[in-house]
Amino acid sequence: MCTEGNLRYTDTLFTEQERGVSIKATPLTLLLPDIKGKSYLMN
């Protein structure tokens, strides 16, 4: 089972959380800022 210090945001199924492994891929989007104030969207 995951603890507060070990969050697993993409593990949505109970079995994934219980075993600590991801069974399937989950799409993820990141918004990354650079030092010049621009932001980049990564999929």
Image: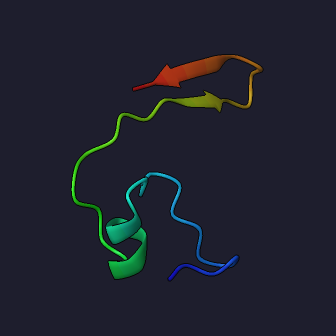
Instruction: Name which quarter of the figure residue 42 lies in.
Output: top left
**Which quarter of the rendering shows the C terminus?**
top left
Q: Is residue 8 left or right of residue 35?
A: left
25 and 33: which is toward the camera: 25
Q: Is 33 in front, or is 6?
A: 6
Going by the image, does 10 lie left or right of 39?
left
Q: Residue at x 77, y 20 (%)?
A: 37
**In this rendering, would 33 be left or right of 42?**
right
Where residue 17 appears, x then y in whole percent?
43, 70
Residue 33, compared with residue 40, is above or below; it is below
Q: Position of residue 29 (x, y in %)?
A: 48, 29
Colour scheme in use? rainbow
Number of marks in picture: 0
* Residue 43 relative to residue 23: left or right: right
Identified at 40% across, 65% down, the residue is 14
Residue occupying the far front of the picture: 14
Q: Residue furthest right?
A: 37
Could you tell me which residue is drawn at 43 percent across and 53 percent down? 12
| Quadrant assignment, res 5 | bottom right
Residue at position x 43%, y 35% in the image: 28
Quarter of image, res 7: bottom right
Q: Residue 1 in the image: x percent, y percent?
A: 50, 83
